[in-house]
Amino acid sequence: MNRTVLTALAIASICIGVAAARPQGIGLGLMGGNPAGLSLKVWTGPNVALDAGLGYSLWYGRALSFHGDVLWHTRSMTQSADGYLPLYIGLGARAVLTDPDYPDMRVGIRVPFGLEYVFSNVPIGLFLELVPTFDLTGVPPGKGLFGPQGSIGFRYYFSGSSED
């Protein structure tokens, strides 16, 4: 699976060769979807970020949900001076606390795919992501291990952003 993810990321990076996204800082915001709650993104380099979420999972049992991912971003898909729009892919983990339908805490793997538009003149990013998940533990008999997640949201970047 790692080879497939790296190949897809390499192809996307080669095909999208316009203005480079150079975000920086820490973004904090809200996400709606599954889960719905707080979103945190910390840029560790020009194309790599750490992402975390704390929210309420509404599907496959209603419970508190935590997740953390490493995200790799492509170059921007736009040449606009108003902002940039990179695609990203990631790998991470999630934990969903117990509820009456799922008596055990579920722990699993996440593979987020998404995009985020970050404005140049204001430190705000708008994002959309789809996330296949695979639960490793805590799934009751008869329930599926695989499930989708997805969010739409925004983040305010406290350290701003810059471009190449």
Image (spheres, helix red, strand yellow):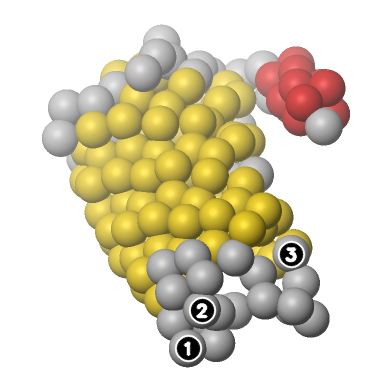
Determine the image quadrant of residue 73.
top right
Helix, strand or loop at disc 1? loop
Position of residue 141 measured from the top left corner of the image (x, y, whole percent): 75, 78
| Residue on which the image places disc 1 | 100
Helix, strand or loop at disc 2? loop
Q: Residue at x 53, y 44 (%)?
A: 93
| Residue on which the image places disc 3 | 145
Discs 3, 1 touching: Cβ within 8 Å: no
What is the CA distance from the residue labelled 2 to the residue labelled 1? Answer: 6 Å
Amino acid type at circle 2 is Pro
Whichever of labels 3 and 1 marks the residue nearer the N terminus, that label is: 1
Residue 80 in the image: above or below residue 10: below
Residue 105 in the image: above or below residue 83: below
Which one is in front, 135 or 111?
Answer: 135
Seen as rendered, the residue at the extreme bottom is 100
Which one is in front, 77 or 12?
Answer: 12
What is the CA distance from the residue labelled 3 to the residue labelled 1? Answer: 18 Å
